[in-house]
Image (tube, helix red, strand yellow):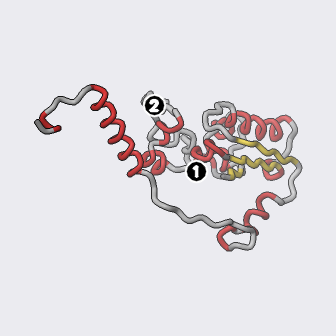
Amino acid sequence: MSRMDKNLSRRELFQTAVAAAGVAVLSGLPGEAEAHDLTPTDPAYRFEKYEAIVNRPVRVRQLYQWPNINNPIIYPNISNGLNGFQFSYNVLPDEIQVVVQAYFSANAATYDDHIWEKYRLGDAFNVKDTATGASAMRNIWLKSKISDQDVSPPPKDRSHPYYADTSIEGLQRRGVLFLT
């Protein structure tokens, strides 16, 4: 009797399934990738543009370290900082500099919807889409619900939704710089 004629035991079936799953996972991994150090003298770094943003004369500078994509308070904290200085201390918006340094899992919050769908980042980082309740196939933090036309120029009324927009696009409109 050949091996194919015998019934497989549960153990053999499990071992075969695990081996097949391992091969499937490994075959889906990207191949070798090249990387290089990005130094301030590298044209891709755009050092002058970066320096013009972070070293401009301002009255207030805030820096947020952001390692965890599932930190639910990072966005309101940034918005509250901007609003507090602007409305409580009368600091002009152009005199406030906020920089957010994303790293570790928080880098994924700066990626577009295409990357979220392609690499299933909602599954990878346990992020649920509030609209569907399923794993996010889009970046739920990136897009603003307010159009550029509705807030250009920025509204004078501090109760306008522009000042409560905690999306990354909304915060970027207000001058927040996200570094990854």
Q: Residues within 10 Å of mark 2 (few under 14, many from 20)?
A: few
Q: Relative to the observer, which residue lies in front, 72 or 120? A: 120
Q: Which kind of residue does numbered mark 1 sit on? A: Asp
The secondary element bearing badge 1 is classed as helix
User: To which residue does mark 1 refer?
Assistant: 148
* Residue pictured at 75% horizontal, 34% vertical: 80
Please indicate whether residue 72 sits to the left or right of residue 19 in the image: right
Residue 54 pos. (x, y %): 79, 57
Q: Relative to the observer, which residue lies in front, 26 or 121? A: 26
Please indicate whether residue 107 sits to the left or right of residue 99 in the image: left
The secondary element bearing badge 2 is classed as loop
Residue 120 pos. (x, y %): 45, 42
User: To which residue does mark 2 refer?
Assistant: 131
* Residue pictured at 65% horizontal, 40% vertical: 162
Q: Is residue 173 above or below residue 20?
A: below
Q: State the separation of the CA atoms marked 2 and 1.
A: 23 Å
Outermost top residue:
10
Asked which quadrant contains residue 20, the reply is top left
Q: Quadrant of the N terminus?
A: top left
* Residue pictured at 84% horizontal, 48% vertical: 61
Q: Which kind of residue does numbered mark 2 sit on? A: Ala
Counting residues from the start of the chain, the first of labels 2 and 1 encountered is: 2
Q: Is residue 84 above or below residue 50?
A: above
Outermost front residue:
1
